[in-house]
Every structure is written in structure tokens, then in C-alpha cells.
Image (cartoon, rainbow, N blue to C red):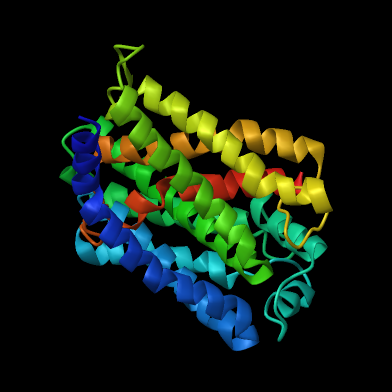
Amino acid sequence: MFNSYIMLCMNSTKTRLKSAIILFAIIIPFFFITYFAKTPGKIIGTIFFATFSVWATFEIVKHNKLNIVLNVFISLLTIFVWIFPLNESKETYLTLYSNQTSLVRDDLIQMLKLLIWGYDNLTHMYVVYIAIIFVVITIIFLINIKKYSSVKQFLIHYLITFFVLWYIPLFSKIIFIHNVANPFFILCMFAVPIVVDTSGYFVGKAFGHAVFQKKFAPHISPKKTWEGAIGSYLLGALFVILLFCIPGVVSYNSSIAYYLSTTQIVLATLLLPAISIIGDLLFSLIKRLQQIKDFSNLIPGHGGLMDRFDSVSLVAIVASIIFVI
């Protein structure tokens, strides 16, 4: 009986595993190039992550009922996040694109603060960027309003488009900055959602509905069970402690520890596993609202980029917020 269960799980995940291996085999070299190849590598990394932003955005906005030309144009707006300088001087960019590997912790914190907390003194980046996408998206959608059968449908696609144009470039630039600073930090952000998602799948398969008969989120992700969600949260919290926190507690070495303060450790342990689950549900909700199963078929068994990086994206953003507080 147990062997049959194991074989069933292996068969159902075979395609997903192959696709994940191929995907990471393509992506991981760019992480190393960005970190180790100094200034040329950072330029290559910028192009890679900016391209990721454009493609991941396009995969989502292409379902908004606008024509492909308009959606390509909308997706290209994400490049604005990569154009605006981070602060009023050139020092930040000279540091970010210097001919050295890694960033000192203080520089990383400063760059993330400038990116996360809204805008810099010269360009007021988020003010300008949000104003640009608000005006452009509003005009485009109003011109094409007849394509929508109701006000509700119009607002759903309008708000989703506006959201991903802010969210995806923010996530990808955060990952890029962390990549320049320390690849271990990238490992932390990717590892937590993988552990949470994998443990939730297997715990749900093994113990689903053993205690709770109701689904965890039946209208958003019908396959999720309360047992799977609870199991993934607990195992995810344990993993956060082991990966993010133990190195700092033991050695207080900022080069191998993401969080150093007790407050950060407690917040990360409590929040990040839940944030991983929420990130999955957030993009499942977007798919439900768009009435699609996957954003694309780019990755067999997974779907599109944000089908795979949904949890990672929100974990990266929230982990960075905890990091700079």
C-alpha cells in the first residue's frame, strides 16, 4: 500500500520535476554570472532580470482581452523600473555595478530601502513610475472598454494589469540586488517556497481530510487541504530557522546569515512560511479571475514563469522588508 502511494506520487511529479530541473539549469548560471563576472556580469544580470520582468508580465497581461501589440507595449513599461536611478547621486549605481563581487551588508540594506520604501530624491521613482503606468493603462483600457462585457470584467483586468506592472519588476529587481550582494541570500528566498510547496503537497496527499473535511481555499485553489497547509507552515517555519537564522545565531557572520537580530528571526520564522502560501494563493486568485488554468505553457507541468515563481516573489519582497527594518 505504501509502495503504491510512493509510485503514484513519483509518477504525478515526474513531468514537474524534469521541467523544474531544466528551468533551474537555465536560470542558475545567470545567478553565478551576475555575481562572479564583476561589472560585465552585473550588466548581463540586469538584462536577464529585466527580460524576466517583461516576459513574466506579458504572460499575465496577455489574458486581459487586449490585442498582442498593446500587451507587448504594456509589458515593456516594466523596463522603467530598471532605468530610473536609485538615488540623487551616482554612488549607489557605482557601488552596484562596481568591478567587485558581493556588496557589504550596509550597502545592500540601503539599496533595498531605496527600492522598497517608494522613491529617491532625484526621480521620485515610484511616484513617476506609478503615475506613468496609471495614465497609460487607464487610457488604453478606456479606449478598449467595449471589449469588456461588464464593468466588473473591465475592473478585474484593469486592476490585475496595474498590479503586475508594479509587482513583478519590484520582485525581479529585489532578486537582482540580492544576487549582486550574495548568492546565498538568493538560495534562502528560493528554498523556503520550495520546501513549503513540496511539504504541503506530500502532507496533503498523505493526510488530507484526515482531520478537516473542508478545503483550505476551495474557491481559489481547490486541491489544497488544511492538513497540507498546516504541515507546510510548520515544516517551512523549521526550515526558515535552519537556513536563515542558525548561521547568524551561531557565528554572527553577516556573510552567511540573512537575519541577525532576534526581531528579524522571529518575524521571518512566523511570517515567511505563511507568505509563501499566500503568494501561491494570490496568483491562483489572479488565474481564477482571468478564468485560466496557467499563465502560459512555457514550463511543462508548471505553466508560466509566475506559475512557478508566485510564492518566491512574495517571499522575496517580504523577506527584504524584514531584512531592512
Tell me residue 255's x, y (percent).
76, 63
Q: Nearer the viewer, residue 294 or 91?
A: 294
Q: Is residue 260 left or right of residue 183?
A: right
Q: Nearer the viewer, residue 302 or 133?
A: 302
From the viewer's perspective, is residue 238 above or below residue 33? above
Split into 4 quadrants, where in the image is the C terminus?
Answer: top right
Q: Residue at x 45, y 28 (%)?
A: 231
Q: Residue at x 19, y 47 (%)?
A: 11
- Does residue 303 appear in this view? no
Split into 4 quadrants, where in the image is the N terminus?
Answer: top left
Q: Is residue 96 left or right of residue 61?
A: right
From the viewer's perspective, is residue 234 above or below residue 48? above
From the viewer's perspective, is residue 44 above or below residue 155? below
From the viewer's perspective, is residue 38 above or below residue 102? below
Tell me residue 126's x, y (percent).
60, 55
Q: Total label count? A: 0
Tell me residue 16's x, y (percent).
26, 53
Q: Nearer the viewer, residue 234 or 127?
A: 234
- Does residue 216 appear in this view? yes
For residue 288, which quarter of the picture?
Answer: top left
Q: Residue at x 72, y 62 (%)?
A: 111
Q: Residue at x 19, y 40 (%)?
A: 8
Q: Is residue 25 left or right of residue 321?
A: left
Tell me residue 170's x, y (percent).
54, 56
